[in-house]
């Protein structure tokens, strides 16, 4: 029985955050990049100190750089702890009143937000929570950038809010807009980068699914092709080889008593062997390449059936043939009719001791009917030949693929063996799936012989 390999199972990923693998190589590469950025940053501070650029700000920049680098290095392994610690450092150095000894750090806005901006960007663009990181960074940004102390003082004094925003505190209020925009861009770019990574991971997963589906489809097609090749070789060779074996046995039986018939029998065997070799070469040529055209004109179904009948009669069988077919049999039905007849005749030669075979092929309004039967007895002609071939399953698959049905079993009187195939016209092939299911249900009821 033909079996089909199950299609490749496709794993559907459930929605959720993208988890990029943390491998030692990736971790080493990430830490190496952080180290290079830190070296470049501290080298810039050393150059600024040498050139006396803002010397009062260098201590604060030093601490901010250290906190930002440590946060970037630890955010992958301890995301929540890193976010909490950097947030506390930012709040302490930018909002809380610093001790007099720390006033020289010069870590006011917007420089004081840099470590938290780095950590929030890495969390949002990576595997960390988006809402918590954005909310924490946004809250600190509002408290650090917005002059809330001036606004609170104006509220206490009863002054309007517009006056508080226009107070001259040494800072141009128009810079506040740029600072808020910069903080918003940190979150926006991180979210876009995360979406891009998720889209890339999803595309990679879809590509993997497509590769699995393609591999399953290729395996299925390859198995179908192997089955088709085996069926073609079986159809072309088994029938003719069985006839050759019967001729050889007949020649052995008459060799001692009637030696004059030995030479004609050997000649027939040689001709039959050449015919088998020719058919094998034809199958090989068909597998190598499609024919380029030309060649002999195709014969009709009736001519092919006459050849099969003549071959059986030449080896001593009495064949009752009743063939009523037109010349316009479509190619799929033609191959199915010839395949069923050839396989049934082969089974009769191999698995029955009868010397009579009845063949009936008719074409009606609903389709084609094939009947091959023998009266028995069902005794193996070649008991040493291995059993368990694929003749009946192959016939059933061929017929069911065209929407037909095939039954096999003992004759109506309980003796012999008969094979009946019903093939519909092309307009009924649409019902092939139902017919195939019906044909497969007969497998458990089929008893007897396979080539």
Image (tube, rainbow, N blue to C red):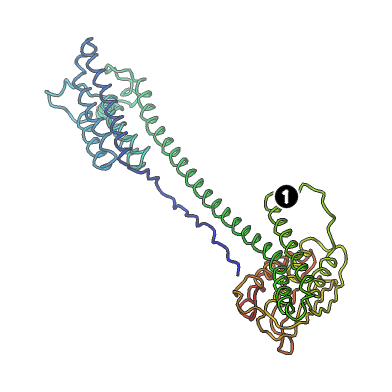
Side (left or right) of 25 relative to 406: left
Q: Picture quarter containing residue 153?
A: top left
Mark 1 burial class by Cα count in 10 Å: few <14, some 14-19, many 20+: few
**Image height of 150 relative to 348, above or below:** above
Side (left or right) of 254 relative to 181: right
**Residue 78 in the image, given as x and y percentages of width and height:** 25, 42
Q: Which residue is mark 1?
A: 290
Q: Residue furthest bottom?
A: 413
* Closest to the observer, 134 or 349: 349
Asked whether residue 379 appears in the rendered view, the answer is yes
**Image height of 298 relative to 116, above or below:** below
**Residue 290 in the image, given as x and y percentages of width and height:** 72, 49
Residue plotted at (17% across, 28% down): 97
Residue plotted at (49% across, 47% down): 208
**Residue 147 in the image, given as x and y percentages of width and height:** 29, 26
Residue plotted at (32% across, 42% down): 23
């Amino acid at each position: 029985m033909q079996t089909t390999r199950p299609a490749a199972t496709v794993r559907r990923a459930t929605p959720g955050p993208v988890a990029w693998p943390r491998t030692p190589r990736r971790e080493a590469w990430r830490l190496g990049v952080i180290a290079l950025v830190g070296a470049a940053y501290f080298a810039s501070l050393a150059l600024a100190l040498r050139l006396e650029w803002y010397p009062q700000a260098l201590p604060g920049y030093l601490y901010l750089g250290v906190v930002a680098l440590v946060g970037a290095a630890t955010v992958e392994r301890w995301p929540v702890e890193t976010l909490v610690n950097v947030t506390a450092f930012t709040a302490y150095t930018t909002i809380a009143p610093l001790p007099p000894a720390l006033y020289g750090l010069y870590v006011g806005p917007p420089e004081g937000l840099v470590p938290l901006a780095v950590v929030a960007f890495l969390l949002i663009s990576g595997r960390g929570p988006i809402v918590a990181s954005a909310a924490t960074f946004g809250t600190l940004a509002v408290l650090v950038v917005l002059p809330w102390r001036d606004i609170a003082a104006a509220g206490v004094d009863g002054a309007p809010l517009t006056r508080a925003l226009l107070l001259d505190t040494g800072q141009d209020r128009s810079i506040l807009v740029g600072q808020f925009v910069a903080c918003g861009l940190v979150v926006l770019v991180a979210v876009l980068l995360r979406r891009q990574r998720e889209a890339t991971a999803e595309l990679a997963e879809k590509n993997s699914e497509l590769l699995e589906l393609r591999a399953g489809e290729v395996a299925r097609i390859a198995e179908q092709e192997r089955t088709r090749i085996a069926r073609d070789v079986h159809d072309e060779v088994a029938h003719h080889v069985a006839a050759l074996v019967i001729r050889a046995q007949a020649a052995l039986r008459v060799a001692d008593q009637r030696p004059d018939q030995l030479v004609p029998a050997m000649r027939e065997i040689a001709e039959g062997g050449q015919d088998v070799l020719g058919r094998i070469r034809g199958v090989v040529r068909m597998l190598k390449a499609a024919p380029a055209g030309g060649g002999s004109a195709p014969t009709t179904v009736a001519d092919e059936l006459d050849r099969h009948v003549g071959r059986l009669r030449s080896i001593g069988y009495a064949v009752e043939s009743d063939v009523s077919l037109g010349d316009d049999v479509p190619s799929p039905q033609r191959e199915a009719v010839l395949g069923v007849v050839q396989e049934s005749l082969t089974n009769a030669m191999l698995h029955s001791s009868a010397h009579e075979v009845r063949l009936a092929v008719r074409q009606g309004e609903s389709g084609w009917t094939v009947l091959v039967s023998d009266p028995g007895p069902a005794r193996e002609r070649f008991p040493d030949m291995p059993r368990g071939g694929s003749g009946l399953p192959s016939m059933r698959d061929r017929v069911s693929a065209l929407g037909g049905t095939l039954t096999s079993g003992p004759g109506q009187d309980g003796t012999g063996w008969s094979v009946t195939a019903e093939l519909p016209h092309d307009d009924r092939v649409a019902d092939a799936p139902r017919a195939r299911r019906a044909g497969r249900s007969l497998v458990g009821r089929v008893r007897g012989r396979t080539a």
